[in-house]
Amino acid sequence: MAPSSLPQTPPSAVVIVLFLLFSTALLCESRLSLDYYSKTCPSFTKIMQDTITNKQITSPTTAAGALRLFFHDCLPNGCDGSILISSTAFNKAERDADINLSLPGDPFDLIVRAKTALELACPNTVSCSDILAVATRDLVTMLGGPYYNVYLGRKDSRVSSASSLEGKLPKPTMSMSQLINLFSSSGFTVQEMVALSGAHTIGFSHCKEFSSNISNDTHYNPRFAQALKQACSGYPNNPTLSVFNDIMTPNKFDNLYYQNLPKGLGLLESDHGLYGDPRTKPFVELYARDQNKFFQDFAKAMQKLSVYGIKTGRRGEIRHSCLLKVYDGWWIMLL
């Protein structure tokens, strides 16, 4: 048969085939999975476990800090690692927004250590947002909290702007209606909000976040209020002064946070609000008497939060360093 007599593929068929191939590639590229790095970075799990364990042993407040860092990364604009990017002379990044200035340094250091080790083993493979998600889950588990699945394959955001956080993170002074609306706008129910608030079972809050309320808020246990006044008496001259969120078991992930609230042992105004509002009080009472139920609901809410607003495929990138950002084609080291 002469070449001129060979059957010709219609142009429309070529377009359809290319479209299907492109769509399939995008689908594969954007699909999350529990074993996302099993082939591309087989040592991922071990490197993460070793780095997390070493950091938590040397700095026991890392777990609480990572949980807060994860929350501040995910809730405003999705779990994309944008909270990790440092500001430049041209851009004020999320981590330098007023609401984030009190974020502790240990979880940032943990992410950098893990990323450095992973880049040596598997260059340009593991995203900063995946590292933060896994580190948070493992640290919660290390302190006695529930294990939950973390699906992997997130990509990192290309941008980070402090102005994008306005009104998207809870503040201790917010009313319960404001808090409920804030979580609802991100697709979380009242019960999920109360379950996530259980993260206050570990960690601490700075005195400046609650000191002005101690004398005026009648929800405080009187003896507890007096102790807080004494502990925070020097905070105007020392803004780093802080108090544990859960004074009973501050380094254990349990349900005592909820048990403390009816006793007037909540630290923040929003803590007292959870027990005082009829929309949230039933869930506080439920979790106070049933730790297994709290763990179950916290795990579900964290798993939901961990995939909220994520970027996959070509919508994001894998940063070579969690402290690097590219501008106009040039990689800039952010120290």
Image (cartoon, rainbow, N blue to C red):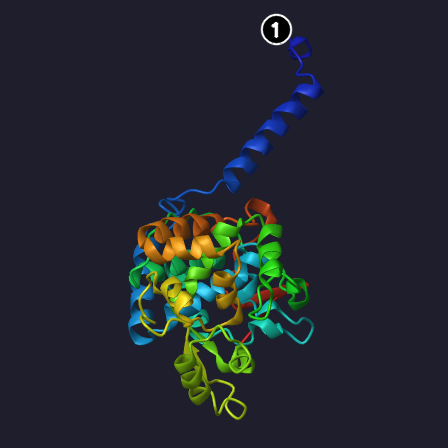
Disc 1 packing (10 Å; few <14; some 14–19; many ≥20): few
330 versus 227 height, above or below: above
Q: Nearer the viewer, residue 94 or 324?
A: 94
Residue drawn at 42 percent across, 76 percent down: 221
Residue drawn at 39 percent across, 44 percent down: 34
Residue drawn at 67 percent across, 76 percent down: 89
15 versus 300 height, above or below: above
286 versus 159 height, above or below: above
Residue 266 horizontal/vertical position (percent): 44, 71
Q: Determine if residue 173 is in view.
A: yes
Residue 35 horizontal/vertical position (percent): 37, 44
Residue drawn at 50 percent across, 48 percent down: 307
Residue 85 horizontal/vertical position (percent): 56, 67
Q: Nearer the viewer, residue 108 or 259?
A: 259
**Disc 1 element:** loop
Residue 242 horizontal/vertical position (percent): 45, 81
Q: Three-letter amino acid code at disc 1?
A: Met
- Number of callouts: 1
203 versus 306 height, above or below: below
Q: Which residue is mark 1?
A: 1
Q: Is residue 226 left or right of residue 83?
A: left
Which of the 4 image quadrants contains residue 94?
Answer: bottom right
Q: Nearer the viewer, residue 32 or 79?
A: 79
Quadrant, the N terminus? top right
Which of the 4 image quadrants contains residue 246?
Answer: bottom left
Instruction: Report the residue that reaches farthest toward the top.
Output: 1
Q: Determine if residue 115 is in view.
A: no
